[in-house]
Amino acid sequence: MIKFLYMQKKAVGLISGGLDSILALQLIKEQNFEIIGIFIKTPFISDFGEKIIKNLKKLSIEMDFKLKIIEVDEEYIEIIKNPEFGYGKNLNPCIDCHIYMLKKAKKIMEDENALFVFTGEVLGQRGKSQNLMALKIIEEKSSLKGILLRPLTALNLEPTEIEKKGIVKREFLLDIKGRNRKTQIYLAQMKNLKYFGTPSGGCLLTDPIFCRKLNDLLKNEKDIRLNDCYLLQIGRHYRISPETKLIITRDEKEAKNIMSFIGENDFLILTEKNPQIIGLIRGKVNTLVFEIYASYIQKNYDLCILKDYKGNILEKKIIEKKDKTNYQNYLI
């Protein structure tokens, strides 16, 4: 007797951890698809994306989908520097970012022999990136024309090829549009969905304060790496000169994190009595760097240690505590 194996159809979804993408995932799952959820990790997600990833791992078990976490590459930095479709209110190149992420999802779709890609986008929810023209541009530029599905707002859009062919039943998709999330919240409660994040999504590229530090980096550094961007989330940043920047950690967690992003041309300043206060120097070591660092020590005088990126001690000197207000002009 010949036995036939049932092969479940596959779909790939961009999953941000927010309510919309999780609802979209649930709608596709209800149509009996095996889901591969893609989370794209960038340097511009709050807390390095750790909380979101932790929640998504829980969610992938609860909702039974495969989770793939992909970190952006150097190409993404070029998009941040020169977005083809421009920025939003701050340094958020949302259209270019969506295109980049969907191209990554398309590659996974091909590797997994999936049938289409879906997102949690909603028509009219974001002024720049989720208007009708932007949605069409994103679909075309990501080379997903006809196979990019937006389940939450599909009934406001022309049917995709996968809907026309009956691969996905259009009558079970939704017609949500605009910024109001009452429908999504209601559906999430009805379907008992958990672990979704806040509507803002935690993208630091929309934060004016963070963007001041990023703008300084773009202005003064030619060869920007991912580690440079991750460092923007750590500590207080001082621009000493076009060639030199000082970053001073605030607490023990930041002191631990900063050690992961040290470059081979960087230097460290620290004291034995305040191990949570570390200064990372990117550029030239000079008197001003020591003075600014000294404004954060607890005692009036302390022994300061200068190290290279390997941890070798280069210099020891007694430093005198300074007044922070003297250096406000250097604070980014």
Image (tube, grey):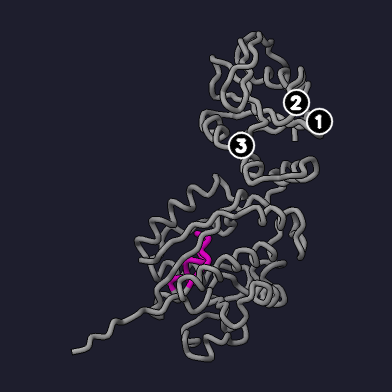
Identify which amino acid the numbered label 3 is placed on. Answer: Ile
x and y percentages locating residue 28 in the rendered image = 45, 76
Identify which amino acid the numbered label 1 is placed on. Answer: Ser
Spatial CA span between label 2 and label 1: 9 Å
Q: What residue did someone put label 2 on?
A: 284
Vertical position of residue 1 compared to residue 189: above or below: below
| Mark closer to the chain start, 2 or 1 | 1
For residue 145, side relative to residue 331 (left or right): left
**In front: mark 2 or mark 1?**
2
- Depth check: 85 or 110 in front? 110
Query: Under tag 1, what secondary structure?
Result: strand
Q: What residue did someone put label 1 on?
A: 241
Q: What residue did someone put label 3 on?
A: 234
Residue for point 65% across, 44% down: 229
For residue 102, side relative to residue 15 (left or right): right
Query: Under tag 2, what secondary structure?
Result: loop
